[in-house]
Structure formats: C-alpha cells, structure tokens
Image: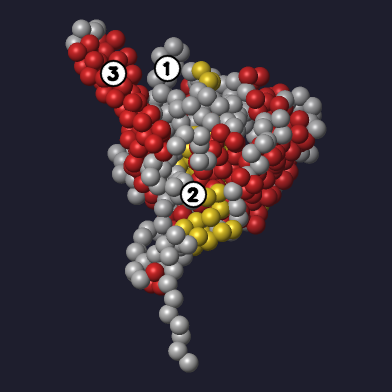
Amino acid sequence: MTMKSWHLDRRTFLRGSGVALALPWMQSMGVAAPVEQAPRRLASVYFPFGVSLPNEKSEYAEWNWFPAETDGSFRFRSSLESLEPLRENVTVLGSLSHASGRKMGGHDTGDIFLTGASFRGTDYRNGISLDQYIASHVGEKTRFGSLVMSSDGGVGEPTRATTLSFTTQGRPIPALSSPRQIFDRLFGVGDASTKYERRRLENTSSMLDLVLENSRSMKNRLGNQDQRKLDDYLASVRDIEQRVNRSTAWLDIPKPDVTEDAVDLAVDQSLPVEYMEAMYDLIFFAFQTDSTRVATYMLGQVAGATTIANAFPACLGLQGNWHGLAHGAGKGDGALKLGRFDQLLAQQLSRFIRRLNETQEYDGTLLDNTLVFYGSSNSKTHNNTNYPLILAGGKSMGFKHNQFLKPGGNVPLANVFVTMLDAMGVPHDGFADSTGELSDLRQT
C-alpha cells in the first residue's frame, strides 16, 4: 500500500487558546523550513509604594516580601508563595536600586524605574527607558515596536509619570489603559479600509516632511535654549515618522486572528483582579503572535491619591487605599494587610509567567524566550533602596534561576539591565550608571 502524497497550504492555521496562528513552513508545503532564532522579548511590570517588610522577629514576619534564607537556599514566604511552582524559572533580587533614585523624593522614582536617569528639582530631564532602547534595535521586526500600558493611561506629569516608557530624549510615551482599545490596536480590523488608512498615513507623512523642512530654516534663528527645545520637538516628529513608516509597511499584512473572547474586553479598573488579568493576557497574546517583542505595564504610579490603582486593595476588603496601606505597614497588623495585597499582585504575575511557561515555542517555551522584569522603586514607602525585584524566564538566553540574589547596595540596578541587553543580543555601551554585567544571573 502506497502512502498518498498531500500538501499543506501556507495559509493553514492552528487554532487554540483564543488565537489562530499561521503554520510555519514545513516540508509538506514543498519548501524546507527556515532555521530561525526564537524571538527574544521583554515584559516589564512596575508597582508603586513598596512592599510589606516587617522585622524578622515580628509576629508578621511571614508577610515579609523577600524570601527567608535557610541553609544556603531560600523559601518563599506568604507574599510570593504563588511563585513556588515556578521557582526554576524565577530569581528574586534584593539590595539593588538606582543610585540616582536614592537622592530623589519617594514619589518621584517611578519615572526612572527603567531609565536610571538622574534629575533633581526643576531640572527634569529623563533618559531613554530600557524597553525603548531594546525596541530601537528589535522593533522593526514586528508590527508594533513596543506595547506601552498602565492602569492610569497617558503620561501623567514630570516625576509623577503614568508610563514606564521614555524616548531617546527622555519624553514619556503615552500608555494605553483600556483593554478594548489595546485589543483593537493589536488585533482589530478597524473601521477604515486599507485604502483609507493608506491615504491617511500618506497625508501624515507629507505633513511631517513639511514640518521637518520648515524647521531647518528656523533653527539658525534661535538661541541655544530654544534650539534644544526644537531639537527635542523634532526628535518626537521623527519618532512619529518612524511609526508611520512601520504602519505603512504592515498595511497589507493581515493582523493575527485572536478571538475577542480570549480576553475580557469589557472589564475596567473598577474590577482590579479581572482588569489586571486582562492586561497580562494582552501582553501574552501580543508576544505569542509576535505582534511586538517589548511591553511595559505600570500597575500604578507613585503619586498617591491621584493614581487609579490606589483603590485596588478594596477588592480584598481592605480598608483604606494602597498608599495608606503602605504607610501603615509598620504599625500593628499593617504588615499583614499590605502583605495580602502584595500576595494578590504576585498571584497575577505568577499566572502570567505560568501561561508563558505552558506555551510551546520552538524547542522550548514562550517563557524561555521572554524576560519578565517585575518590581517597585520603593522598598518601604518612600524608601528608595533595596528595591523588591523579580526576574523570570530567559532560559534560552542563558539565564539561571531558583535564586535569591543580594549583590549589595553599591551595585547599580543598571547592571541587571546590561545583563539583559547582552542576553538579548542588543548592542550597547553600558546603560545609565552600569558598571558591568551581574554574572550571577547567567549560566557560566
């Protein structure tokens, strides 16, 4: 009996988990499959106000966010217990911070979490964030250079930013906060036809060309300070120009087919647990479909009462707000209360990491090819040292885990960033105040 020959079309799709993905090239398609390196990705998640850090002799010591060290190993305590099944893919980092942040107010450091920039007083000039630096090297490979999200949305104000992402000139990149809006941008067909969208992009490109042309003749007539402002403005125009060019190039390529019921798109910040799940799900699908390889999510910003996320702890029946819980963590059972909310946040992170780890990609998992960086720029409220940090994933990039590392208070957090850049193959001459790699994070 002879086997009947058969042929697969490139447009054949695999469906599952709410997403339809085009099959890779196979021999049965008549062409040998190309050998490709798995995409390397970064997801960065920030939360404000620090964590519960009761004294080791306190009756609430089990709610200390950092693991307990025992006989050369460590044990996750209550706040991070959801990470236990994932410990082979997780490293907890302590003692690190940005040196520049130690000189700043406790409500200012969210702006520099991914930049490590130094600014004081009215001389506010941030630097490029880690995600945008990576996006500048890998963003052209995907439809979207990066995905920027926060619970508050927009950009906020200087030292009270509602976004983690900053351009080369240190300008904040507006964050998206609506799951529906984010989904439509990533996967929606949209109201306009391709023909209309192409015309709109062409008109935008023409206007940008006119702005750039007129600015050249203006620059020579300006003083030094105004020239700097104009340069910043023109850099923003060029950023828009790059996004227009990318959008134009992708016009004729269909967006991935992700079903709307794969994400709870009706949810908003009034339902914190469901909302956080939806935001993490959107990052997951953006990575799984290779729509982008860089994502940031600011759970809340550090301005206290003005952040929408300040009300999130109410979902656990906790009295007061997030900022108030953080201030009260050292009083009475305050460590327990804040610890319960720390625990909820860690459960959401664990769910995201677990989903990445359960999704096969190439010879490993999506998590193997993704770095997840999670943490706060406060240890306790307004204390800008000893950041609570977690780094997960990246095994295919040589990262080793199942560790609780405390490199020391004089080691710049930017050394972790440099280690990530090296592992992702992104060229650099250092980042912020880095002094080298953090070698304990990598396989020898």
Q: Amino acid at mark 3?
A: Val
Label 2 vs 1, first from the N-terminus: 1
Residue under label 2: 256
- Residue at 51 percent across and 18 percent down: it is 157
Q: Nearer the viewer, residue 176 or 26?
A: 26
Q: Amino acid at mark 2?
A: Pro
Q: Position of residue 287 (x, y in %)?
A: 49, 48
In the picture, measured across the screen, residue 109 lies left or right of residue 143, that is right
Q: CA distance from mark 2 to mark 1?
A: 40 Å
Q: Residues within 10 Å of mark 1 (few under 14, many from 20)?
A: few
Q: Nearer the viewer, mark 2 or mark 1?
A: 2
* Vertical arrangement, residue 256 with respect to residue 155, above or below: below
Report which residue position mark 1 lands on: 124
Q: Are marks 2 and 1 in contact (CB under 8 Å)?
A: no
Task: Give the numbered dot on residue 278.
Answer: none
Q: Please give the label number shown on residue 211.
A: 3
Image vertical order of residue 133 relative to residue 163, above or below: below
Residue 402 x %, y %: 56, 55
Q: Residue at x 51, y 29 (%)?
A: 175
N-term mark: 3 or 1: 1
Closest to the observer, 124 or 415: 124
Labels 3 & 1 near each other (Cβ < 8 A): no
Disc 3 on helix, strand or loop? helix
Mark 3–mark 1 distance (CA, rounded to whole Å): 26 Å
Residue 248 appears left or right of 147: left
Local secondary structure at mark 1: loop
Instruction: Please tell me whether mark 2 sits on a helix, a strand or a loop.
Output: loop
Q: Amino acid at mark 1?
A: Tyr
Quarter occupied by residue 321: top right
Judged left or right of residue 115, residue 219 is left
